[in-house]
Image (cartoon, rainbow, N blue to C red):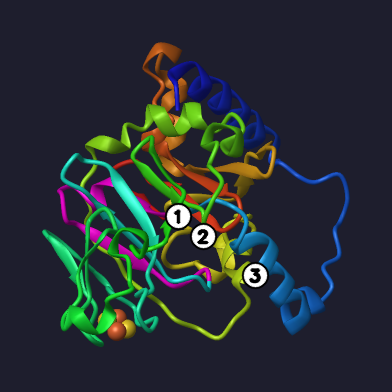
Amino acid sequence: MKHEAQVEQLRKIFGYLDAGETAMGDAVYHHHVSDYTSPDQAGREQEVLFRNEPLLIGLSCELPNPGDYVTDDFSGVPILAVRDEAGQVNAFINVCRHRGARVASGCGSGKAVFRCPYHAWTYDRSGRLRSIPFERGFESVDKTSNGLRSLPVVEKYGMIWVMPAPGGSIDIDSHLAGMADDLAAFGLVCYSHYETRVLRARLNWKLVIDTFLETYHLSTLHKNTIAPILHSNLGTFDGMARNLRMIGARKTIDALRQRPESEWDLIRHSALVYVLFPNTVFIMQGDHLET
Ligand code: FES
Protein backbone atom coordinates (compact mmCIF):
# COMPACT_ATOMS: atom_id res chain seq x y z
CA MET A 1 0.00 0.00 0.00
CA LYS A 2 1.37 3.42 -0.96
CA HIS A 3 2.25 5.84 1.82
CA GLU A 4 -0.48 8.37 1.02
CA ALA A 5 -3.04 5.58 1.15
CA GLN A 6 -1.60 4.43 4.50
CA VAL A 7 -2.01 7.93 5.93
CA GLU A 8 -5.60 8.08 4.69
CA GLN A 9 -6.40 4.75 6.34
CA LEU A 10 -4.64 5.74 9.56
CA ARG A 11 -6.70 8.90 9.82
CA LYS A 12 -9.81 6.78 9.43
CA ILE A 13 -8.61 4.33 12.11
CA PHE A 14 -7.79 7.09 14.59
CA GLY A 15 -11.26 8.52 13.96
CA TYR A 16 -12.82 5.15 14.76
CA LEU A 17 -10.67 4.77 17.89
CA ASP A 18 -11.60 8.21 19.16
CA ALA A 19 -15.29 7.63 18.57
CA GLY A 20 -15.36 3.98 19.69
CA GLU A 21 -16.66 3.11 16.23
CA THR A 22 -15.90 0.70 13.43
CA ALA A 23 -16.92 0.43 9.79
CA MET A 24 -20.43 -0.93 9.59
CA GLY A 25 -22.91 -2.00 6.96
CA ASP A 26 -26.03 0.03 6.24
CA ALA A 27 -28.24 -2.51 7.99
CA VAL A 28 -28.22 -5.90 9.64
CA TYR A 29 -27.92 -8.63 7.03
CA HIS A 30 -29.60 -11.98 7.55
CA HIS A 31 -27.86 -15.04 6.15
CA HIS A 32 -29.99 -18.03 5.35
CA VAL A 33 -28.60 -21.14 6.99
CA SER A 34 -29.06 -22.89 3.65
CA ASP A 35 -26.29 -20.66 2.23
CA TYR A 36 -23.97 -22.88 4.25
CA THR A 37 -25.77 -26.22 4.13
CA SER A 38 -27.44 -26.58 0.74
CA PRO A 39 -25.65 -29.10 -1.51
CA ASP A 40 -27.40 -27.54 -4.53
CA GLN A 41 -26.07 -24.11 -3.70
CA ALA A 42 -22.61 -25.50 -3.02
CA GLY A 43 -22.71 -27.14 -6.46
CA ARG A 44 -23.70 -23.88 -8.13
CA GLU A 45 -20.98 -22.00 -6.27
CA GLN A 46 -18.47 -24.61 -7.39
CA GLU A 47 -19.54 -24.14 -10.99
CA VAL A 48 -19.88 -20.36 -11.04
CA LEU A 49 -17.10 -19.27 -8.68
CA PHE A 50 -14.47 -21.97 -8.96
CA ARG A 51 -14.63 -22.85 -12.67
CA ASN A 52 -14.99 -19.45 -14.28
CA GLU A 53 -12.88 -17.08 -12.23
CA PRO A 54 -9.11 -16.70 -11.88
CA LEU A 55 -7.97 -18.41 -8.70
CA LEU A 56 -4.88 -17.48 -6.75
CA ILE A 57 -2.97 -20.74 -6.55
CA GLY A 58 0.20 -19.43 -4.98
CA LEU A 59 2.85 -16.78 -4.65
CA SER A 60 5.76 -16.41 -7.02
CA CYS A 61 8.17 -17.17 -4.18
CA GLU A 62 6.76 -20.69 -4.01
CA LEU A 63 8.16 -21.34 -7.49
CA PRO A 64 11.48 -19.48 -7.50
CA ASN A 65 13.35 -21.67 -10.01
CA PRO A 66 12.77 -23.59 -13.23
CA GLY A 67 11.14 -26.94 -12.54
CA ASP A 68 9.51 -25.77 -9.30
CA TYR A 69 5.86 -26.76 -9.30
CA VAL A 70 2.65 -26.83 -7.30
CA THR A 71 -0.55 -28.78 -7.77
CA ASP A 72 -3.97 -27.70 -6.65
CA ASP A 73 -7.13 -29.80 -6.46
CA PHE A 74 -9.18 -27.43 -4.38
CA SER A 75 -11.26 -25.97 -7.22
CA GLY A 76 -12.41 -29.41 -8.32
CA VAL A 77 -10.19 -29.17 -11.40
CA PRO A 78 -6.75 -30.73 -10.91
CA ILE A 79 -4.22 -27.99 -11.67
CA LEU A 80 -0.47 -28.19 -12.19
CA ALA A 81 1.63 -25.02 -12.34
CA VAL A 82 5.34 -25.15 -13.12
CA ARG A 83 8.04 -22.61 -13.85
CA ASP A 84 9.86 -23.27 -17.11
CA GLU A 85 13.46 -22.62 -18.12
CA ALA A 86 12.54 -19.18 -19.47
CA GLY A 87 11.19 -18.23 -16.05
CA GLN A 88 7.56 -18.30 -17.10
CA VAL A 89 4.90 -20.10 -15.09
CA ASN A 90 2.80 -22.54 -17.13
CA ALA A 91 -0.42 -24.10 -15.90
CA PHE A 92 -2.13 -27.27 -17.03
CA ILE A 93 -4.93 -29.61 -16.18
CA ASN A 94 -3.06 -32.16 -14.13
CA VAL A 95 -4.42 -35.07 -16.15
CA CYS A 96 -2.42 -37.44 -18.32
CA ARG A 97 -3.65 -37.57 -21.91
CA HIS A 98 -3.44 -41.37 -21.90
CA ARG A 99 -5.80 -42.63 -19.21
CA GLY A 100 -6.27 -39.57 -17.04
CA ALA A 101 -3.98 -40.17 -14.09
CA ARG A 102 -2.54 -37.12 -12.35
CA VAL A 103 0.98 -36.58 -13.64
CA ALA A 104 2.13 -34.71 -10.51
CA SER A 105 1.09 -34.48 -6.90
CA GLY A 106 1.91 -32.11 -4.06
CA CYS A 107 4.68 -29.68 -4.87
CA GLY A 108 8.36 -29.91 -5.58
CA SER A 109 11.38 -28.34 -7.17
CA GLY A 110 13.74 -28.81 -10.07
CA LYS A 111 11.47 -31.12 -12.03
CA ALA A 112 12.64 -31.50 -15.64
CA VAL A 113 9.75 -33.72 -16.76
CA PHE A 114 6.55 -35.05 -15.24
CA ARG A 115 6.37 -38.81 -15.57
CA CYS A 116 2.89 -40.20 -15.26
CA PRO A 117 2.84 -42.78 -12.47
CA TYR A 118 0.47 -45.08 -14.41
CA HIS A 119 2.27 -46.00 -17.68
CA ALA A 120 5.13 -43.49 -17.64
CA TRP A 121 4.16 -41.10 -20.44
CA THR A 122 6.29 -38.03 -19.81
CA TYR A 123 5.59 -34.31 -20.26
CA ASP A 124 7.99 -31.40 -20.06
CA ARG A 125 7.65 -28.07 -18.25
CA SER A 126 5.79 -26.67 -21.24
CA GLY A 127 3.33 -29.53 -21.15
CA ARG A 128 4.64 -31.16 -24.33
CA LEU A 129 4.31 -34.92 -24.49
CA ARG A 130 7.91 -36.04 -24.70
CA SER A 131 7.87 -39.82 -24.58
CA ILE A 132 5.56 -42.80 -24.71
CA PRO A 133 6.96 -46.12 -23.58
CA PHE A 134 6.32 -48.90 -26.11
CA GLU A 135 5.53 -46.19 -28.64
CA ARG A 136 4.83 -48.59 -31.51
CA GLY A 137 1.60 -49.48 -29.69
CA PHE A 138 0.47 -45.87 -30.18
CA GLU A 139 1.38 -45.25 -33.80
CA SER A 140 -1.60 -43.00 -34.51
CA VAL A 141 -1.06 -40.83 -31.45
CA ASP A 142 0.36 -37.46 -32.48
CA LYS A 143 2.62 -36.37 -29.62
CA THR A 144 2.52 -32.73 -30.71
CA SER A 145 -1.23 -32.50 -30.14
CA ASN A 146 -1.42 -34.58 -26.99
CA GLY A 147 0.41 -32.47 -24.48
CA LEU A 148 -1.12 -31.50 -21.17
CA ARG A 149 -4.13 -29.19 -21.60
CA SER A 150 -3.03 -25.62 -20.94
CA LEU A 151 -4.87 -23.34 -18.57
CA PRO A 152 -4.74 -19.53 -18.64
CA VAL A 153 -2.23 -18.29 -16.09
CA VAL A 154 -0.98 -14.86 -15.03
CA GLU A 155 1.93 -14.03 -12.75
CA LYS A 156 1.89 -10.45 -11.51
CA TYR A 157 2.64 -8.58 -8.26
CA GLY A 158 4.42 -11.71 -6.98
CA MET A 159 1.24 -13.76 -7.25
CA ILE A 160 0.06 -16.52 -9.58
CA TRP A 161 -3.51 -16.83 -10.83
CA VAL A 162 -4.91 -19.69 -12.88
CA MET A 163 -8.25 -19.97 -14.64
CA PRO A 164 -9.41 -23.54 -14.05
CA ALA A 165 -10.89 -23.87 -17.55
CA PRO A 166 -8.99 -24.07 -20.86
CA GLY A 167 -9.23 -21.21 -23.34
CA GLY A 168 -9.76 -17.56 -22.67
CA SER A 169 -7.48 -15.20 -20.84
CA ILE A 170 -7.12 -13.46 -17.49
CA ASP A 171 -7.32 -9.69 -17.11
CA ILE A 172 -6.02 -9.63 -13.57
CA ASP A 173 -6.02 -5.85 -13.14
CA SER A 174 -9.71 -5.69 -14.02
CA HIS A 175 -10.30 -8.57 -11.66
CA LEU A 176 -8.48 -6.81 -8.82
CA ALA A 177 -10.39 -3.60 -9.51
CA GLY A 178 -8.04 -1.07 -7.94
CA MET A 179 -6.49 -3.39 -5.37
CA ALA A 180 -3.44 -3.84 -7.56
CA ASP A 181 -1.82 -0.65 -6.19
CA ASP A 182 -1.74 -2.12 -2.70
CA LEU A 183 -0.46 -5.49 -3.85
CA ALA A 184 2.25 -3.97 -6.05
CA ALA A 185 3.49 -1.77 -3.20
CA PHE A 186 4.01 -4.78 -0.93
CA GLY A 187 6.84 -5.94 -3.22
CA LEU A 188 5.96 -9.60 -2.92
CA VAL A 189 8.58 -10.57 -5.47
CA CYS A 190 11.15 -10.03 -2.71
CA TYR A 191 9.44 -12.42 -0.30
CA SER A 192 10.44 -16.00 0.50
CA HIS A 193 8.11 -18.88 1.12
CA TYR A 194 8.20 -20.02 4.73
CA GLU A 195 5.55 -22.66 5.18
CA THR A 196 2.42 -24.18 3.68
CA ARG A 197 -0.06 -25.94 5.93
CA VAL A 198 -3.16 -27.76 4.75
CA LEU A 199 -6.02 -27.87 7.23
CA ARG A 200 -8.93 -30.06 6.24
CA ALA A 201 -12.31 -29.69 7.89
CA ARG A 202 -15.87 -30.58 6.92
CA LEU A 203 -17.36 -27.12 6.64
CA ASN A 204 -18.70 -24.77 4.01
CA TRP A 205 -15.93 -22.77 2.36
CA LYS A 206 -17.65 -19.45 3.11
CA LEU A 207 -17.25 -19.96 6.85
CA VAL A 208 -13.50 -19.68 6.42
CA ILE A 209 -13.90 -16.35 4.62
CA ASP A 210 -16.49 -15.05 7.07
CA THR A 211 -14.23 -15.25 10.07
CA PHE A 212 -11.84 -12.78 8.44
CA LEU A 213 -14.57 -10.22 7.79
CA GLU A 214 -14.87 -8.83 11.29
CA THR A 215 -12.88 -8.18 14.44
CA TYR A 216 -16.02 -8.35 16.57
CA HIS A 217 -15.05 -11.81 17.86
CA LEU A 218 -11.51 -11.00 18.99
CA SER A 219 -12.21 -10.05 22.59
CA THR A 220 -14.12 -13.27 23.24
CA LEU A 221 -12.91 -16.05 20.96
CA HIS A 222 -9.29 -14.87 20.94
CA LYS A 223 -9.25 -13.35 24.40
CA ASN A 224 -5.86 -14.80 25.33
CA THR A 225 -4.14 -14.74 21.94
CA ILE A 226 -4.88 -11.98 19.44
CA ALA A 227 -7.02 -9.70 21.60
CA PRO A 228 -4.05 -8.35 23.58
CA ILE A 229 -2.42 -7.39 20.29
CA LEU A 230 -5.26 -6.02 18.14
CA HIS A 231 -8.05 -3.59 18.90
CA SER A 232 -11.26 -5.60 19.08
CA ASN A 233 -14.29 -4.62 17.03
CA LEU A 234 -12.43 -2.05 15.01
CA GLY A 235 -11.99 -2.45 11.29
CA THR A 236 -12.04 -0.34 8.17
CA PHE A 237 -13.86 -1.51 5.08
CA ASP A 238 -13.23 -0.73 1.43
CA GLY A 239 -14.94 -2.68 -1.30
CA MET A 240 -13.29 -2.79 -4.71
CA ALA A 241 -15.74 -4.40 -7.11
CA ARG A 242 -15.95 -7.97 -5.84
CA ASN A 243 -12.85 -7.73 -3.64
CA LEU A 244 -12.56 -6.11 -0.26
CA ARG A 245 -10.03 -4.72 2.17
CA MET A 246 -10.50 -4.65 5.93
CA ILE A 247 -7.80 -3.21 8.19
CA GLY A 248 -7.52 -4.21 11.81
CA ALA A 249 -5.40 -2.04 14.12
CA ARG A 250 -2.64 -3.28 16.41
CA LYS A 251 -2.60 -1.59 19.79
CA THR A 252 0.81 -0.16 18.95
CA ILE A 253 -0.88 2.03 16.36
CA ASP A 254 -1.61 4.76 18.90
CA ALA A 255 2.09 5.60 19.16
CA LEU A 256 1.95 6.92 15.58
CA ARG A 257 -0.14 9.86 16.70
CA GLN A 258 3.02 11.32 18.26
CA ARG A 259 4.92 11.04 14.97
CA PRO A 260 4.71 13.27 11.89
CA GLU A 261 2.50 11.82 9.15
CA SER A 262 5.53 11.43 6.92
CA GLU A 263 6.71 8.71 9.32
CA TRP A 264 3.40 6.90 9.67
CA ASP A 265 3.76 3.23 8.84
CA LEU A 266 0.41 1.49 8.77
CA ILE A 267 1.83 -1.87 7.74
CA ARG A 268 3.78 -2.38 10.99
CA HIS A 269 0.83 -1.45 13.17
CA SER A 270 -2.06 -3.28 11.55
CA ALA A 271 -3.34 -6.48 10.02
CA LEU A 272 -4.43 -5.76 6.47
CA VAL A 273 -6.98 -8.30 5.36
CA TYR A 274 -7.83 -8.59 1.67
CA VAL A 275 -10.42 -10.94 0.30
CA LEU A 276 -9.57 -11.47 -3.33
CA PHE A 277 -12.59 -12.73 -5.17
CA PRO A 278 -13.69 -15.44 -5.02
CA ASN A 279 -11.90 -17.25 -2.21
CA THR A 280 -8.48 -15.92 -1.28
CA VAL A 281 -7.87 -14.33 2.09
CA PHE A 282 -4.59 -12.43 1.94
CA ILE A 283 -3.30 -10.89 5.18
CA MET A 284 -0.35 -8.55 5.44
CA GLN A 285 0.95 -8.93 8.98
CA GLY A 286 3.78 -6.39 8.99
CA ASP A 287 6.76 -8.71 8.98
CA HIS A 288 5.12 -11.50 6.97
CA LEU A 289 2.01 -12.27 5.00
CA GLU A 290 -0.41 -15.15 5.00
CA THR A 291 -2.77 -16.37 2.33
S1 FES B 1 -2.47 -42.78 -17.59
FE1 FES B 1 -0.67 -41.67 -17.78
S2 FES B 1 0.64 -42.94 -18.86
FE2 FES B 1 -1.19 -44.06 -18.77
Comparing labels 1 and 2, the label whose residue is closer to the camera: 1
- Circle on res. 164: 2
Label 2, secondary structure: give it: loop
The circle on residue 151 is 1
Q: Quadrant of residue 73?
A: bottom left
Identify residue for label 3. 46
Identify the image quadrant of residue 82: bottom left
Residue located at (27% from left, 58% from top): 128
Mark 3 to mark 1: distance in Å? 18 Å
Amino acid at dot 1: Leu
- Of badges 3 and 1, the one in the foreground is 1
Pointer 1 with pointer 2, Cβ within 8 A:
yes
Q: What separation in Å lies between label 3 and label 2 (alpha carbons)?
A: 11 Å
Image quarter for ligand 1: bottom left
Residue 189: x %, y % from top left? 27, 36
| Front one among 265 and 179 | 179
Instruction: Name the spot of residue 169 as percent of width and height, x first.
Output: 53, 42
Picture residue at 77% right of the left edge, 73% below the top: 35
On residue 165, the disc is none
For residue 41, side relative to residue 118 (left or right): right
Q: Residues within 10 Å of mark 3 (few under 14, many from 20)?
A: some
The residue stretch that appears in magenta: 57-75
* 10 in the magenta segment: no
